[in-house]
Image: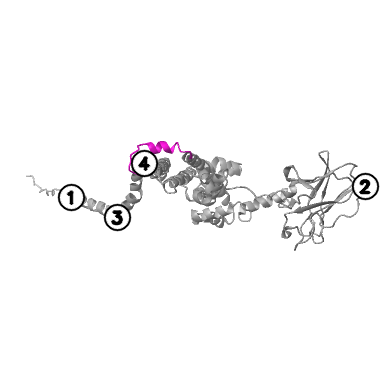
Amino acid sequence: MTATVPVKEQAAPSAAGPARQRRTRRRGRAVALLFVFPALLLLGALVVYPVLFSVGRSFFDASGTRFVGGGNYTEMFQDPATVKAIRNTAIWVVVAPALLTGLGLILAVLVEKVRWATAFKLLLFMPMAVSFLAAGIIFRLAYDEDPNKGVLNAAVVSVHDAFAGTSSYPTARARTGHGLTPAAGGAYTTAAGISPGGAGVVLPMVGVLPKDLPKGAEPAQQPSGSAPSGEVRGVVYLDFTPGGGGKQGQVDAKESGLPGMKVEAVRDGHTAATATTTADGSFRFTHLAAGSYTLRLPGANFAPPYQGVSWLGPALVTPAIIGAYLWIWTGFAMVLIGAGLSTLPRETLEAARVDGANEWQIFRRITVPLLAPVLTVVFVTLVINVMKVFDLVYIIAPGPVQEDATVLATQMWLVSFGGGNNQGLGSALGVLLLLLVIPAMVFNVRRFRRSQR
């Protein structure tokens, strides 16, 4: 007889479980959407809507009432100012990110060998805390052409004058009708011939303020008597008596000599002798051969002072603004590359040193290849940034050379609001700028996603 064991029946799965899970998922999505909605609203209002509006507006004329199709895009590439803006933007994209990435890499490697690395990084990164407006004002002053205002030109003028010297009397000119006549190159020559052994020569000058006279200048003395054989004597002086009085072309008691003035004795078109005036303006030529000579005051005595470099002129304005941009962003590139440098496997670098590699070989064959992903991200990020540069160009470039320095962002503003009042063409420039930025942005996003994986 076989016993039967009762089998417990399993309960049928409840249909309420999946339904509850679906409700939970829907509730979670609703809560997530509720939190994301303000951000989406701001994104749509501040990014999506302006982009779509600009795209639509680019197909209408300046008034916004007449549809012109691709007319604005055609005009954009026919306008010389816009073509120059595209060219300048290309210069920015090629030069600035490459220089910044290279400087950042070099500084990041060198900073590792500096004892006060943190303080050095802080100093280089500090310009990032300065607004582009403030940085533009700083460099506008630094690039000022007046050496008394612009620090760069003050340094350039100091170096130039240290090696090339400067003229003593840039404002001086000869007293007309008293023996001196203008010559080529800003020089002055005596109208009559001068013979050795004759009477002293008086060369009166005007146009020099008493306060501008060199220190140590003494009262001039009228040459007396005849010079010895083979000798010519004379005096170069300021033909001006403080307080009035005196006689033109004659050395008076209160009139000062002009020291440091170069004088040449010229015969048959060639310089036979050279002299420099003393503290009282007197000069003397000795051992001259018999004959007639012309005395010449070379134009170098009256050359205007060297004023330095026109940093904000048409030729240098774009490199000058790129220099200001480098000052601001070098610290950013250095810090990012330095962060990547700190993650490099030290055992690899040490193994290379043990194998006999020098620092240059390690840098070129190990450090740079391992840092390639970081360098690429920094470079692309800077490319995106320079395409949008506006503040520095608008502030640093003076009005007369604004067109020579303009880039797409400034040209878009100038065309739309800076006097052009053509929002149709300005919108087309904005769309062009967006199309140029999008590939770099997509590339950067893909790089970030690959690095996260």
Kind of residue at disc 2? Ser
Kind of residue at disc 1? Ala
Residue 190 among magenta residues: no
Residue on which the image places disc 1: 19
Instruction: Report the front residue among 103 and 304.
Output: 304
Q: Residue furthest left?
A: 1
Residue on which the image places disc 4: 61
Q: Where is residue 180 in the image (x, y as percent from the top left)?
A: 78, 48
Which circle, 2 or 3, is nearer the viewer? 2
Q: Distance between the residues labelled 2 and 3?
A: 106 Å
Which disc, if any, is residue 229? 2
Residue 61 among magenta residues: yes
The answer to whether mark 1 and mark 2 are in CB contact below 8 A is: no
Near mark 4 (Cα within 10 A), the count class, few <14, some 14-19 or many ≥20, is some
Which disc, if any, is residue 35? 3
Kind of residue at disc 4? Asp
Q: Where is residue 308 in the image (x, y as percent from the top left)?
A: 64, 49
Q: Distance between the residues labelled 3 and 1?
A: 25 Å
Mark 4, secondary structure of its residue: loop
Q: In this view, does 40 lie to the left or right of 440?
A: left
Highlighted range, magenta? 60-80
Mark 3 or mark 4: which comes first in sequence? 3
